[in-house]
Structure formats: C-alpha cells, structure tokens
Image (cartoon, rainbow, N blue to C red):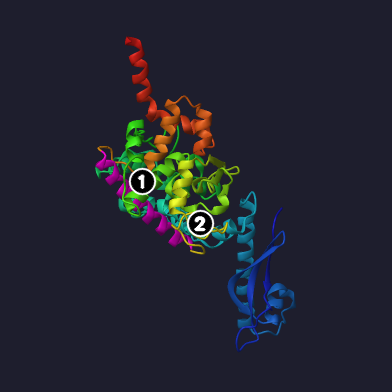
Amino acid sequence: MKPNIVILLDTRRKKKDSEKYPVKLRVTFIKEQKYYPVDLDMTREEFNLVQNPGHISKDAEPAFKKQLKEWRLKCNAILVKANQINDTLPDFDFRLFEKKMYQNKQSATDVFFYYTETINRLKKNERLGTAGNYQCSMNSLKAFRPKLSFRDISVEFLQDYEAWLLANGKSISTVGIYVRPLRAIINQAIDEGTVSRDTHYAFGKRKYQIPASKNIKKALTREELRKIILYDALPGTWYEKARDFFILSYLCNGINIKDIALLKYKNIDGDYIHFTRAKTQHTSRTASTTISIFKLDEISAIIERWKNGDTDKENYLFPILERGIDAERELRLIQQFTKMVNRYIKKVAASVGITKSVTSYYARHSFATILRNGGAPTAFISESLGHTSTKTTESYLDSFESEAKMKWARVLIE
C-alpha cells in the first residue's frame, strides 16, 4: 500500500491578525494522517491561484504573478521530493519518511546523528541500559574520530580503532561492547537505504570480525558455595542481605539482581515463581521465554526475611523498587542495590577465605556449573537460564570444562 501525498491549505487555524492560512504537506496512510509545514502562508484566493495558474488575471500585477510562480515552484518541488522518497521505501513508515524528508545531506551520512537518534528512541522506550551502552560506544568513537561518516568506516578503520582501544588499556571484551552498537547502527542505515551494504559494510568473513571475549570462569566450587551459605551474618545488616540475595540468585536459576528487583507478588504461583528476563523482553524476535523456579524452603525463608510488607499482587516482592517510578529512577535504584550486594558479598567471601573477587554474577555461573557437573543436560540448563538457544548455553558453559577435564584425567590413572 502507498500513502496519499498532497499539498493543501490548512484552514483549521487562521494565522493571527491575517486572512492567511498555513500551507501543509499532508500524508495519509491507511487511517493515519500527518501534516508537515512547508513554510508558506496564503489566503484561500492565493492558494487557489497557485493550484490553478490558468485563473490568474491578465491584469494582475507582475510582482504578484512572480510571487505566485515562486510559491507554485516551491510547492511542486516539495511534492516531488515527498513522492520520490516514498518510492524509495519498500514499506511506507512515517518515521523513515520524516527522516529522509527533513534531514540534511550531511546528517544522512553522519554516524553520530544515527547514534543520537537511536539513543533518544531507546530512552523514549525506557530501555535506559541499552541507551547507556550506545552512549558509551558513541563517546569512545568520538574520542577516536570526532567526525565520522559511514564512508569512513572500513576494515582498516575498525582495525585501527581496535588497536587504539587496546593501546589505551581496554580489554578485548570492551572492544566488542563498543563495536557491536556501531555494527547495529550501520545495519540500520543500510535497512533504511541511507547507505549501501556493498560499499559500507566492513564486517563479516574475510572482513573485520568483532573479537569474541574469552570466557572467564566465574563459578564457585561446592565448598566455596557452602562457606557463603553457612556464613553467620548479623541479622538485618548488609552482610546478611548480600549473602541472602546471592543465595537467592543461585537457587533461582541464576536470576540476576535486576530481575530479582522486578519480581512482583503476582510472579508467585503456589510452589513456583514464574518470570521473564528483562534482558530478553526487547531483544527476542519471538515471545520471551518464561522461567519457572520451584520454590525451595530455602527460597521461601529468604523471601520471608526481606519481602515487601504489602502483598498486593502488583507490588514488588522486595522493597528495592517503588510502584509508579519512572525508568530512570528504576535504573538508579537497581544499580545502587546491585552495587551494595556486590560490595558486601566480596567482604563475605573474603572473610570465609575465598580469594576470588566474587560478585552477584558468580551466582549465575555457579548455578550453571553445579548443574553441569551434576550431569544435567544442556537443554535443561538452557531452559533454566532463559536462553532461547542451546548454542548460547554451550558457549556459556565453555568456561566450566576445566573441572570436568580434571575429573576424567584422574580416571585415567586410578
């Protein structure tokens, strides 16, 4: 389906102290109409003469005739441009139409223009964490190249950028974190027809490949977990709270702190807790996977100790967040709570003789590795973690192979 595009006189509102009305470009698609200014104001008579030049009187002033001609040329040029843009869109979309219609040629090829637009859209959709990732990526690129167009991005450019990051103390993981948003921006520009894949895509086989970060084992052994679980913390302190929420994460399929904070009473259904990972709600192409957790007595005890007193089903299970807050405050509260849990779980771990720099993320890895070493099938671990593909889980479990190798190596000499 194609939209209907016309130039018209918008007579809904007269200009102040005048008989003139604004001239608008009106685009109608399905049942939606949008009006765009063309920076012209005319009376009804003037607009009629612009649309029907044959009705202009021969006795009209030359200056008036000239003005009508200029208006007609401007209206026709805008209409032609709008229709040409429409012809380039395989499926009409108001956002893309507006972008192509009103952005200047320089911004059309400006990588940072695309970054800014994407960041604003993510913030509008309350995806503040992802917006922050794009912002960090853009800040880094700006430090490396203050002005950047799509034609500047080549295999050589990406290799130089990676080398610059590494020389400035960034890790291989950070390189991937910064470059992936750039790749997404380029793919977006290609999809919108702003740039050509043949000439502006420097990623892929025999081109630049984003370095894969090396899996670093972040799992605790059974004995280390036991030490944390049995840690005798003073009731009501952050030591107790950090220990409990670490154990809760471990027992609840490696649930991360953000998802713990977002749990509501309605997520509890008898002996089970059902939830959807916040991380996958906006990224999965299909419906997000619901994770189901059997509520062990140990889980119930932790909930009882730290739960929100108001048990309304729409209330948060734990008093980490408040109802009705905006996305920005929600993010700040989750970050602050995660920071405190990480700070005190490190102290707990150190006090029981664990030399690893333990964070809440260790609970997720520990959950996976204990299941793996206990013989659980990858498909079960994948479902428990909320992965949409076992390939993701297999990659995730790569760092847990060393214990298994040691186990089977010992079999050879027993």
Q: Of the residues tagged 2 and 1, which is closer to the observer?
A: 1
Whether residue 412 is visible to the viewer of this picture, yes or no, is: yes
The residue at the point 61 percent across, 83 percent down is 15
Where residue 264 appears, x then y in whole percent?
53, 53
Quadrant in which the C terminus appears: top left
Where residue 249 appears, x then y in whole percent?
43, 43
- Spatial CA span between label 2 and label 1: 20 Å
Looking at the image, which is closer to me, 28 or 78? 28
Task: Establish if 374 lies above or below 330.
Answer: above
Q: Secondary structure at mark 1?
A: helix
Crowding around mark 1 (Cα neighbors within 10 Å: few <14, some 14 to 19, many 20+) is many
The residue at the point 39 percent across, 44 percent down is 246
Q: Residue furthest top?
A: 413
Residue 397 falls inside the magenta stretch: no
Q: Which residues are magenta?
A: 326-352
Q: Is residue 294 left or right of residue 155?
A: right
Looking at the image, which is closer to me, 222 or 123? 222
Q: Which mark is residue 62?
A: none
Where residue 256 appears, x then y in whole percent?
44, 45
Residue of label 2: 316
Q: Is residue 353 left or right of residue 310?
A: left
Looking at the image, which is closer to me, 102 or 173? 173
Residue of label 1: 243
* Quarter of the view holding residue 232: top left
Whether residue 186 is visible to the viewer of this picture, yes or no, is: no
Crowding around mark 2 (Cα neighbors within 10 Å: few <14, some 14 to 19, many 20+) is many
* Labels 2 & 1 near each other (Cβ < 8 A): no
